[in-house]
Amino acid sequence: MTDNKAFEPMEHVDTILFDLDGTLINTVDLIVASFMHTMETYYPGEYEEKDVIHFIGPPLSETFEKLDPARIQEMTDTYRTFNHEKHDELVKDYEGVYETVELLHRQGYKMAIVTTKRSDTALKGLRLMGLDRFFDVVVALDHVENYKPHPEPLEKALKQLGSSADRALMVGDSHHDILGGKNTGTKTAGVAWSVKGREYMEMYEPDVLLETMPDLLKVLNVHAGNRG
């Protein structure tokens, strides 16, 4: 559990908004490989894995626009074709995620996915990890005009869940998630397993930093036999 803030259980929270990649499912190897494939296609020999780590988080269009505005769609198509082909081979789980989400679902928490991925790819990952049955609400890139940290996707998820920001917690591995939560008015939880590192997450001052996903149960004061 984070040691940079006094730990106070969020017992008033009944709604959890989760980022997907790097938070619930381990897509780091897949994303890095997809970016490396794309970079080698268009900029052979110019990028290493440590360089493309910085591309993780925002939508592909934002990343590729900075590289070459004239080839955004072409580069995006190259990335996605490789990404879909290698998806099931390279995506892994995070220890404790399934058990934590299952328990929260059983306890009646309202839960949604809020991601900067397209919905088809997001659902592919959820199904692969067996998490799809816990999430009736998935707000993806193709469902909104503005992506995190803009509050639109979080507000859309809250509306579909019949909840409000003051009862919600946004959980994620990126500053897009933490700032998105702050901009919406939710509590925020960063994950220490972010590929960008613990110090990166702490910079954005989430309300709590989770060492493992089961720590979320401590934050919410949830026990296997009861809620709260």
Image: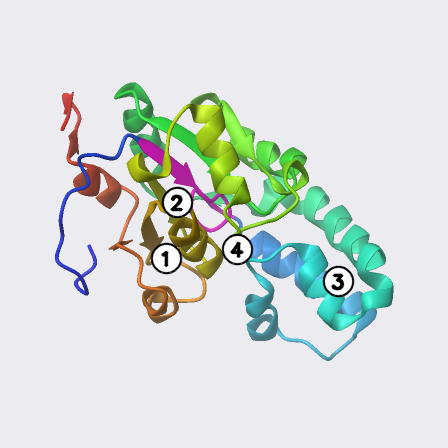
Give the crowd class for mark 2: few <14, some 14-19, many >=20 residues within 10 Å: some
63 sits left or right of 15 in the view: right
- Provide the secondary structure element on which disc 4 rests: helix
- Cβ atoms under marks 3 and 4 closer than 8 Å: no
Residue annotated with mark 2:
94
- Cβ atoms under marks 1 and 3 closer than 8 Å: no
Residue annotated with mark 4:
28
Identify the mark at residue 193; answer none if there is no mark: 1
Calculate the distance from the C-alpha at mark 1 to the C-alpha at mark 4: 11 Å
Does the magenta segment cover residue 21? yes
Q: Quadrant of residue 35?
A: bottom right
110 sits left or right of 56 in the view: left
Q: Quadrant of residue 226?
A: top left
Q: Which residues are magenta?
A: 15-26
- Cβ atoms under marks 1 and 2 closer than 8 Å: yes
- Provide the secondary structure element on which disc 2 rests: loop
Q: Image point 43% across, 57% down: which residue?
A: 179
- The kind of residue tagged 4 is Val
Q: Which percent across, then down, holds residue 147?
A: 59, 49
Calculate the distance from the C-alpha at mark 1 to the C-alpha at mark 3: 25 Å
N-term-proximal mark, 2 vs 4: 4
Above or below, 213 against 45 in this view is above
Give the crowd class for mark 1: few <14, some 14-19, many >=20 residues within 10 Å: some
- Provide the secondary structure element on which disc 3 rests: helix
N-term-proximal mark, 1 vs 3: 3
